[in-house]
Image (cartoon, helix red, strand yellow):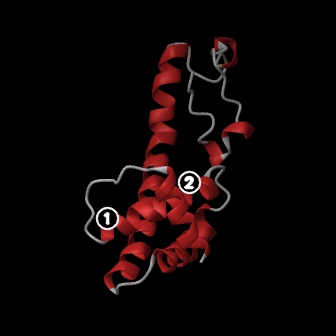
Amino acid sequence: MFDGSSIAGWRGINESDMIMMPHDHTVVGVMPASFKFWDAQVYLPLIYGVPAAIENTRDFVDSTYRAASRVAARGGSLKEAWDAVRAACDQKFKDYVIYEHCLPFNVARAYDEARGIDTPRVWTADRDRQMWEALQG
């Protein structure tokens, strides 16, 4: 069960204290007596974690798209978009657990959108190979 604990401090999920089944005894003494465990479970992440997560996601999407779209606007390559996005995003997001894994796909999608491809293209093994060749070339 997601309890929001992996949001605090932007820890990786493998470093969080997220649990499958909640331990309601851990909330006693932290919450007012009128606050039931499930109230805390539902409302505290909304109050403290979700707005920060949404803002962080917005920053990532905006930073990625802005950098890729500047390259696309001047007719630059996917590799140039990759380099521009890395310059814009690495310092802010490089410590996120799946940043390196997902970034090539995020850059490819942002670059496509910036070039007017509004519907995501089907991802195939051939497209995957072409993307990696472009990024490494």
Q: Which residue is tagged 1?
A: 113
Say whether marks 2 and 1 touch (CB < 8 Å).
Answer: no
Which numbered disc, 2 or 1, marks the residue that appears first in the sequence? 2
Query: Any mark on residue 48, and which?
Result: none
Q: Name the kind of residue labelled 1 in the image.
A: Glu
Query: In this figure, what is the number of numbered marks?
Result: 2
Asked if residue 59 shows in the view, the reply is no
Residue neighbourhood size for the residue with mark 2, other residues' Cα within 10 Å, grouped as few (<14), some (14–19), many (≥20): few
- Residue 128's x, y, as percent? 52, 57
Q: Is residue 83 above or below residue 105?
A: below
Query: Any mark on residue 102, and which?
Result: 2
Q: Name the kind of residue labelled 2 in the image.
A: Cys
Q: Say which of 97 and 4 sits in front.
A: 97
Question: Which image quadrant is residue 20 in?
Answer: top right
| Quadrant that contains the N terminus | top right
Q: Say which of 18 and 116 sits in front.
A: 116
- Residue 19's x, y, as percent? 66, 23
Residue neighbourhood size for the residue with mark 1, other residues' Cα within 10 Å, grouped as few (<14), some (14–19), many (≥20): some
User: Which residue is drawn at the image coordinates 51% and 51% (left, top)?
Assistant: 125
Report the side of 133 relative to 122 (left or right). right
Report the side of 68 relative to 23 (left or right). left
Callout 2: SS: helix
- Residue 13's x, y, as percent? 66, 38
Question: Which image quadrant is residue 12 in?
Answer: top right
User: Which residue is drawn at the image coordinates 56% and 54% (left, top)?
Assistant: 102
Residue most toward the right? 15
Spatial CA distance of label 2 from label 1 is 17 Å
Q: Say which of 127 and 40 sits in front.
A: 127
User: Which residue is drawn at the image coordinates 40% and 60% (left, top)?
Assistant: 109
User: Which residue is drawn at the image coordinates 46% and 53% (left, top)?
Assistant: 57
Asked if residue 28 shows in the view, the reply is yes
Q: Say which of 40 and 114 sits in front.
A: 114
